[in-house]
Image: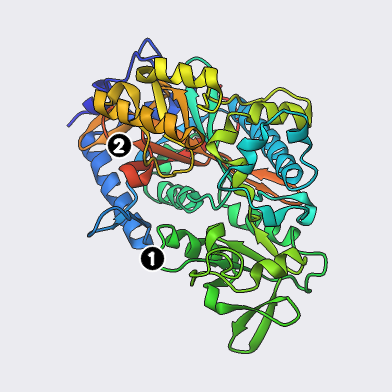
Amino acid sequence: MTNDFLHEYPGGGSSDDEMFDESGAFRDDYRELGEILQRWTLDDHLQREERADLALLSAGITFNVYSEEEGTERIFPFSLIPRIVGAQEWARVEAGLKQRLQALNQFLLDVYGDQRIIKEGVVPEEIVLSSPGFRPEMSGFRPPLGIYAHIAGCDLVRDEQQGIVVLEDNLRTPSGVSYVLENRMVMLRVVPDLFPRWGVRAVADYPNQLLAMLLSVRPGDGGDPPRAVLLTPGIYNSAYFEHSFLSNQMGIPLVEGSDLTVGDDDYVYLRSTSGLERIDVVYRRIDDDFLDPTVYRPDSMLGVPGLMRSYLNGHVTLVNAPGAGVADDKVVYRWVPDIIRYYLDEDPILPNVETFSPLVPSELDHICAHARELVIKPANESGGYGVLIGEQASTAELEDTLAQVKQEPRNWIAQPLLQFSTIPTFDGDQLKPRRADLRPFVLSGQDTWVIPGGLTRVALREGSYIVNSSQGGGSKDTWVLNEEPG
């Protein structure tokens, strides 16, 4: 059997394909990979793909789909053909992400402090104060090192016109980094011969970097040695595999709310076989609403009564800070370039996608007039739910969504439909172009560190722009080259 799967790839000659240029030749970053793949037969690929699936199955890499009544736990689909990012391009991405998180953390400090950016009219007050992520109880609170968003996952896409742009920010409990680490381990085990001779930047240091960041933001009166835990909602959470994986990799306890208690002294303690052990940092993977039933939802069985009191008194650090979600609100996103300019006096290194808010009258008019050309998104949904792609929607769907936009303008945004880049991905025994995004993870503590690459998610359905695993997406390993190909 020959390697016709590569020669017959329909994405060659497209300007938005990452592996092939308009002439159908390999792009520079992919040339060595392509030369190796040209020696593969289809059987070679299918056999290795089967080995990769078995490795993922044995590792227990699954996720839950809440919208289905049965068979909700799935293996995350994985593609052996990696995404490659050149060294120079990555340097720009890394600088842009550090710039963005510096500005967003200053924004959060300001929003819960003097609110200068609101008073000076840079960001409208109603946008901030009406955000579901805004937590009034955080007003006046300065977390250790002044950092609210310690862990960020910024979703990037490569647009034909602007290059790499930021599609959205995730500053609450961003997930997916465990897939980054497992994907790399699977690639090294199953296809070590694909790696280029000039090398790929390693991702395995993430757990060490994460633990160092957690300990660097411990409270000023923290214990010695400092102790951190990872707080999970439990085994039924869609990201429980990741919670277990990261706690194991960092060597810190994985706990549920019932494992922690707040003492009369307002410190947080872990119930252990040897008694109560004081905890300095809680890496929480529980949403704000469920953290503390005495402050947020009183019916929450997931959180810890008194946790917010301990936090606001400076006796424990919560990562990420409650209230960080105001800065990843999709409506606030519309103003992030202005936020960067305001706090840093710099133009954004990584641009936003052009975004229209129905709260701005002229932008509402634009949305209504150009709905067919836009992607209309609910402002506070995740996982790709509720997104309407104008050109793919029926007239009834479009009219219904526009009626909701007019009725609740704070709950919607609209963006042009980006023809973002495609990467070769197997669909059965055929190689097809599939659209992909990239979620790098940024750690902000004593220092700021960006994992080289991140999670590449691919839309496995033909013609789809939705890459989320809950919507049928898969993933790829992301290679950041150590140096430019010669």
> Residue 255 location in percent, x, y?
54, 72
Q: Quadrant of residue 312?
A: bottom right
Element at label 2: loop
- For badge 2, the amino acid type reads Leu
Report the residue marked by disc 2: 460
> Residue at image x 76%, y 73%?
225
Q: Classify mark 2: residues with Cα within 10 Å, few (<14), some (14-19) or many (20+).
A: many
Q: Quadrant of residue 392?
A: top left
Q: Classify mark 1: residues with Cα within 10 Å, few (<14), some (14-19) or many (20+).
A: few
Considering every residue shown, the one lying at the far front of the view is 407
Front residue of this view, candidates 337 and 483: 337
Considering every residue shown, the one lying at the far right of the view is 220
On the rendered image, what quadrant is the N terminus found in? top left
Front residue of this view, candidates 335 and 40: 335
Considering every residue shown, the one lying at the far bottom of the view is 274
Report the residue marked by disc 1: 236
Q: Is residue 82 visible?
A: yes
> Residue 17 location in percent, x, y?
39, 21
Residue 129 left/right relative to 456: right
